[in-house]
Amino acid sequence: MNRGASSLFEGPLIDTSMRETVLRVHGRDEMAMKQLFWELEQHLKSSSGASVVAIDNKIEQAMDLVKSHLMYAVREEVEVLKEQIKELIERNSQLEQENNLLKNLASPEQLAQFQAQVQSGSPPSAPLAAQNSGPSA
């Protein structure tokens, strides 16, 4: 047997689990070569199909994990925001009560002066602040 140019393939297959023996295919043995490639193709198709399914399953699991983490984070954020809204509503109510009280205690001149300052965009003047704190002393 000549091991020179007449040999098309010689050596072990890369996947030793598929074939444990050494194949020697010669130029005249085309049928053995076709059989080898067919078996190799079938093995790769079955392996890649299983691999694709396994990869798809892992991707789906990872996406489910990300989804559950995001949902947990969103729920936590919603709870924080609900608490902040509750606090802001309470604060707004307190400020409205304080505003109504101050309006009732202010004189007509003070209210007119305040309205003029609000319309002009200037800050409240010192005499208005002094007048508001004056009666309580």
Image (spheres, rainbow, N blue to C red):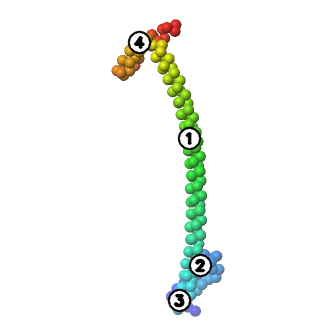
Is any atom of residue 65 visible in this view? Answer: yes
The structure residue drawn at horizontal position 58% and vertical position 39%, both measured from the top left corner, is: 79
Point out which mark residue 78 bears. Answer: 1
Which is more foreground, mark 4 or mark 2?
4
**First of labels 1, 2 by sequence position:** 2
Q: Which residue is mark 2?
A: 13
Q: Nearer the viewer, residue 108 or 24?
A: 108
Where residue 24 appears, as percent x and y from the top left, is 58, 86
**First of labels 3, 1 by sequence position:** 3
Point out which mark residue 30 bears. Answer: 3
**What element does badge 2 sit on?**
loop
Q: Quadrant of residue 46?
A: bottom right
Which is more foreground, mark 2 or mark 3?
3
Q: Which residue is mark 4?
A: 108
Tell me how far mark 4 sits from mark 2, CA to CA. 102 Å
Residue type, label 1: Val
Residue type, label 3: Glu
Tell me how far mark 4 sits from mark 1, CA to CA. 45 Å
Which is more foreground, mark 3 or mark 4?
4
Tell me how far mark 2 sits from mark 3, CA to CA. 17 Å
Tell me how far mark 1 sits from mark 2, CA to CA. 59 Å
* Image vertical order of residue 114 relative to residue 31, above or below: above
